[in-house]
Image (spheres, rainbow, N blue to C red):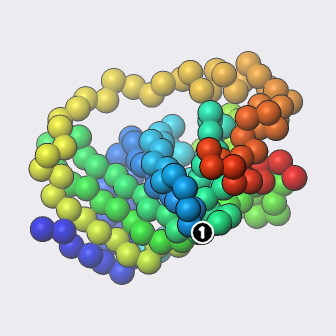
Amino acid sequence: MGKQFAELSYAHQAFITAQPLFFTGTAARDGKVNISPKGMDSLRVLDATTIAYVNATGSGNETAGHLLDHPRMTLMWCSFNKRPQILRTYGTARTIHPRDAEWRVLAAQLPDVPGARQIYVQSIEMVQTSCGYAVPFMELVGERDTLRHWADDKGPDGVATYWKDRNQATLDGLPTKVIE
């Protein structure tokens, strides 16, 4: 029942935009596979083959380390409402840090997220849709504001200290280059 496409159609883009949650999956050549849920309206479709999302500070920094070792990334959205559907994009991704020249241009296209650590830009190689018939119905109550308050309370210097103390390596010890 799955269908594959070379790029995102307008219908795919509308589906992505309507979802309040997405998942990102990465893996280095060896070690643990990482799957992370993302929200905060942090993602934008830039064109039919490019997606970017701003990554907030978190307890880990697996994606950054994985992409340095092997740049593959899968993004996934699933509908929890009336119309069942799952959509995945497969491709490669690159990391943009606040210190990089490209940050300002990309950040202007994305929401302002306190404690923003990276922007990931995925180049899509394949899009796949599937039915989602087994995904449960769920109702969105609202966004959590906990991370926003945490980053605001820490301030830029406190967030940078957190990166230094807790985000410089993956679970498997790969460097993340969050600070250089």
Q: Please tell me which residue lies in front, 61 or 28.
A: 28
Q: Name the residue tied to disc 1.
A: 70
Say above or below: 157 vs 169: above
Say above or below: 155 vs 105: above
Q: Please tell me which residue lies in front, 68 or 132.
A: 68
Q: Please tell me which residue lies in front, 79 or 163.
A: 163
Say above or below: 32 vs 143: below
Locate residue 62 relative to residue 165 in the image: left or right: left
Locate residue 35 relative to residue 173 in the image: left or right: left
Q: Quadrant of residue 20?
A: top left
* Relative image position of residue 45 (x, y in whole percent): 48, 62
On the question of residue 166 being in view, the answer is yes
Residue at 71% in and 59% down: 96
On the question of residue 54 being in view, the answer is no
* Crowding at mark 1 (Cα within 10 Å: few <14, some 14-19, many 20+): some
Tell me the quadrant of the picture where the N terminus can be found.
bottom left
* Relative image position of residue 86 (x, y in whole percent): 25, 56
Q: Please tell me which residue lies in front, 105 or 39.
A: 39
Say above or below: 111 vs 161: below
* Relative image position of residue 70 (x, y in whole percent): 60, 69
Locate residue 153 relative to residue 143 in the image: left or right: right
Residue at 34% in and 52% down: 77
Identify the amino acid type marked 1: His
Residue at 64% in and 21% down: 149
Label count reads 1
* Relative image position of residue 54 (x, y in whole percent): 61, 49
